[in-house]
Amino acid sequence: MRAYLRSLRGRITLVTVSVAMLAVLATGLISLQLVRVSTINEAKAQLAAQAEVLSKLRAAATIGDLSDRVKLALGDTDVALVRRNGQVVGGAAAYIDRAMVRRLLRGNPVSTVRRSDGETVVIEGRATPSGAAIVLVRSQASLERTTQQTAGRILIALLVGIFLAVIAGALLARWIAKPLVTTAATARRMAAGERGLPITAHRPTEIADVADALASLDHALTTSEGRQREFLLSISHELRTPLTAVRGYGEAMTDGLIHEADIASVGATLVAETERLDRFVADLLELARLEADDFVIHRQALDVAALLDEAGQAWLGRCATLGVALAVTADHTTIVTDGRRVRQVLDGLVENALRVTPAGAGVQLHARTEGTDVVLEVRDGGPGLSADDLRVAFERGALHARYRDIRPVGTGLGLSIASRLVSRLGGSIVAGNAPGGGAVFIVRLPAA
């Protein structure tokens, strides 16, 4: 029972029944009061009507005749006769005071509720044509018996209403909670790894919103996990290639198949493949750091022109080997940022540029000031990027998966790392195509 009351269904039922009971209680109290007032008013009206009838009788009518007529018409009612000399006779004489007598003898009616000797009575008096008066008195206790009967019937109706409210509350709670229970079960299945589950948009609107949000989450998880799966497949493929080469040469050396004259070239191949593996591992570690809370930015004054010159000198030898011309132009501007991270971004972009730039073409590094920002550009002499490429350029492994069987590609992580680094530095990076051909990557960094 306690578990049920903790549930949404139990709480809805409890609230519904509580509200119903409060409404029933208020309705019952108001109804009983209205019945009581209505009963008294009805009794006064009956007494007044009977007093009017009796006041028109002949003057010779005795108190006994009057009492018999009243008992026959109204039941438990006392009668008093006020004579012209002010004398009051009859069973109701004890309830009539001198003020009432004077009022009646002047020909005025009397209609009141009076408490006498611990008893509340209803009094109605009318003057007769002969100058006397007739007074009828009925105890409120006799009226209460009628009220109690009516109150009993009202109580039964209210209890039936409460019973129906309990049933209605339970059904309402079940109707409201059912879609939530279904949605929770779907969420648990999603947590267990199921995807593409049908999620019905239930009503009311708030629950439909939860179902729509869960459907959106399911779609997002499906998309994200699909991309991660493709990324892992791609990385596994790229890791397997250098490992296969290393293993093949290792087995060949173990079996004595490598001639002494070839050891140097085999060693160079093994070094190149291990460096390739090292780049994969370094890129993966960098991504892990970028997604961790302990990734630290060390900000200090940085001469942008000096940084670009340094990067150009570092890549000059590689460009000469590939037959690619490298041009560096920069405005002398000082900004406050992490120079090591900016250099890391530039190195990644230059490496990508050299991978797609053929011999005889060029790579350009350029820096300029725009307002309070510094803009860095890296342009290559390659085939450029399509509209589809631009949409996914900074997604992890997207371009790698698209072009790995067409042209030389890297690990598929470089542009993703560059985008995250620039974001951590408070800047932005976009990809586009240069007017003369080739791709261009534009990094915008705040001066401070």
Image (spheres, grey):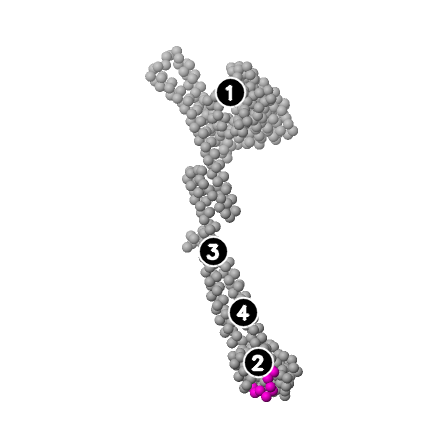
Badge 2 local density, few (<14 within 10 Å), some, or many (20+)?
many
Name the residue carrying label 1.
355
Which residue: 49% across, 29% down? 396
Q: What is the CA distance from the residue labelled 4 to the residue labelled 3?
A: 30 Å
Any magenta on residue 187? no
State yes or no: discs 4 and 3 in contact (Cβ < 8 Å): no
- Vertical placement of 74 versus 304: above or below? below
**Where is the C terminus found, in terms of image quarters?**
top right
Which structural element holds mark 2? strand
State yes or no: discs 2 and 4 in contact (Cβ < 8 Å): no
Which numbered disc, 4 or 3, marks the residue that appears first in the sequence?
4
Residue 4 visible in image: yes
Residue type at tag 4: Val
Determine the residue located farthest toward the left in the rendered image: 255
Which numbered disc, 2 or 4, marks the residue that appears first in the sequence?
4
Which structural element holds mark 4? helix
Name the residue carrying label 3.
169
Between disc 1 and disc 3, the foreground one is: 3
Residue type at tag 2: Leu
Q: What is the CA distance from the residue labelled 1 to the residue labelled 4?
A: 96 Å
Q: What is the CA distance from the residue labelled 1 to the residue labelled 3?
A: 70 Å
Magenta stretch bounds: 54-63
The image position of residue 329, as x and y in percent, is 61, 20
Between disc 2 and disc 3, the foreground one is: 2
Depth check, front residue: 332 or 160: 160
Badge 1 local density, few (<14 within 10 Å), some, or many (20+)?
some
Name the residue carrying label 4.
35
Name the residue carrying label 2.
136
The number of numbered badges drawn on the structure is: 4
Q: What is the CA distance from the residue labelled 2 to the residue labelled 4?
A: 22 Å
